Image: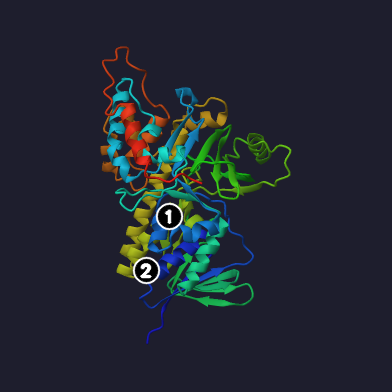
Amino acid sequence: MDSPMRIIIVGGGTAGWMAANLFAKRWAHLPIQITVVESPDIKTVGVGEGSTPTLQQFFKQLNILDEDWMPHCNATYKYNIKFSGWSPGSGIDSYNHPFFTQLDTFTERPFTVNCYTRRLGLDVITQPDTFFFNSYLTEHHKLPYTPDNFPFEINYGYHFDSQKLGQFLMGHAKKLAVEHKLLTVDTVTLADNGDIKELHGSKGEVVKGEFFVDCTGFRSQLLQQTLGVTFNSFNDNLFNDAAIVLPTQVHNAKFETQSIAMSNGWRWQIPLTHRQGNGYVYSKDFQSPDKAEQELRQSLGLLDSDVEAMHLNMKVGQVNKHWHKNCLALGLSQGFIEPLEATALHLVQISIESFMDRFQNGNYQETDRDEFNKLTKARFDSVRDYIVAHYKLNTRNDSDYWLANRDNNNLSDSLLQLLDTWFTNGDLAQEIKTQNAHSHFGNASWHCLLAGYGTFPQLAANQPGTGDQFHEHQLHRFLHGCLLNFNAAK
């Protein structure tokens, strides 16, 4: 009998254990042995505490119910991201970017048509909060529980303690026969053809495998350090390169992440069951770490507190090849597009799923690697463009940081075309479709951003009639009727 193929995942953390679980679940019938090699001396970053609805699908694939994992990870639901203070020049204090549900098929078109009408200078309702159901669930503190006969799916993300999530996923992976080895990888040996052959531990251990997954974080010990794959920085259009993290008590928080503009970046507020996660994402080119910490503490009322802050450096960009030779990079090893919009685990998950499709079908032939790398790069680029637009379109004038972001012209051709389509009253949905740029942020998301920032011309002098697809009271009646099917949050 042939020996099983050995897949070695180097590095634990959320990315490594997500990969281990999905590999073990889908390939349970194949002769594959999965091993996670984790160093007891290296701590995971462990501050990514928000997700998109793709994590909901991740747990469904593993047949894990919310009640099976959420209490272990101090997790809460997440329907929405609320942006505050990003575009004061438009007169808009805040706007919502909700996750979209099947119910929104009834209101997305009125929203986009109203946005087009407002782009023509007519006074119509364009606040995203008004049109999408998860905004109402957020505002009314509703849990996503419906009767069995409720005909629509409700999409939601989560907030969670990332350290505890990694521990939970490790325990589940072990139940799926994933092997766990604690050792610190000191050196890596290559085969004659340039593939990775062996890992050598600091105490003389040797781990052999046929395929390796690099989950070693920003240092990317396998893909970048050993195989020499280059890293392409995004610092010419995403300036933020550092973050500060401080926990506080949580009080009656809504099921949403808050993204609040600061003097030289933005801060998040993430409610968990036992605490509120807070972080300030900023650029060290515009603000020192000490000044940034002081600003964060002041905003949280912690100037006199002895709660210790954690300082982190960020490496924003992506590798030139996410899969090279017999090595796949996941998580921070493959790239990172700052915490705004919480895309990190989404990119990890779709990278894992895309890899599994091509690995199983083609046994990692060169054509499969090329196709995977092209698709993954495009996904990272598409997410980056959406994040860049948040900074480019800001209307703040209170610091050189915000002015530099607004004046930054290092934009991709794709983003330039999307913005040109919007400002020249073109068909944005068709442009997104033409570019195939909707893998994560689609038509509704772009409309939420552009309408939420108030990127409209001045109102026309003559207003013939609103042209609203729905009057506001009709929207409220419809969405409030749907709310009757939901239990109140406790």
x and y percent of residue 79 in the render?
44, 44
Residue nearer the viewer, 110 or 439: 110
The residue at 56%/50% (across/down) is: 273
Q: Which residue is mark 2?
A: 26
**SS under mark 2:** helix
Crowding near pointer 1: few (<14 within 10 Å), some, many (20+)? some
x and y percent of residue 42 in the render?
62, 62
Work out whether 187 lies above or below 317.
below
Work out whether 318 lies above or below 329.
above
Residue nearer the viewer, 343 or 134: 134
Crowding near pointer 2: few (<14 within 10 Å), some, many (20+)? few
Q: Badges 2 and 1: C-beta atoms under 8 Å apart?
A: no
- Give the quarter of the figure containing the N terminus: bottom left
Work out whether 104 lies above or below 207.
above
Work out whether 65 lies above or below 252.
below
x and y percent of residue 231 in the render?
48, 53
Q: Which residue is mark 1?
A: 55
Report the amino acid beneath label 2.
Arg
The residue at 59%/77% (across/down) is: 205
Report the amino acid beneath label 1.
Leu
Q: Using the numbered discs, state the Cα–Cα distance from disc 2 to disc 1 in whole angstroms.
A: 17 Å
- The first of marks 2 and 1 along the sequence is 2
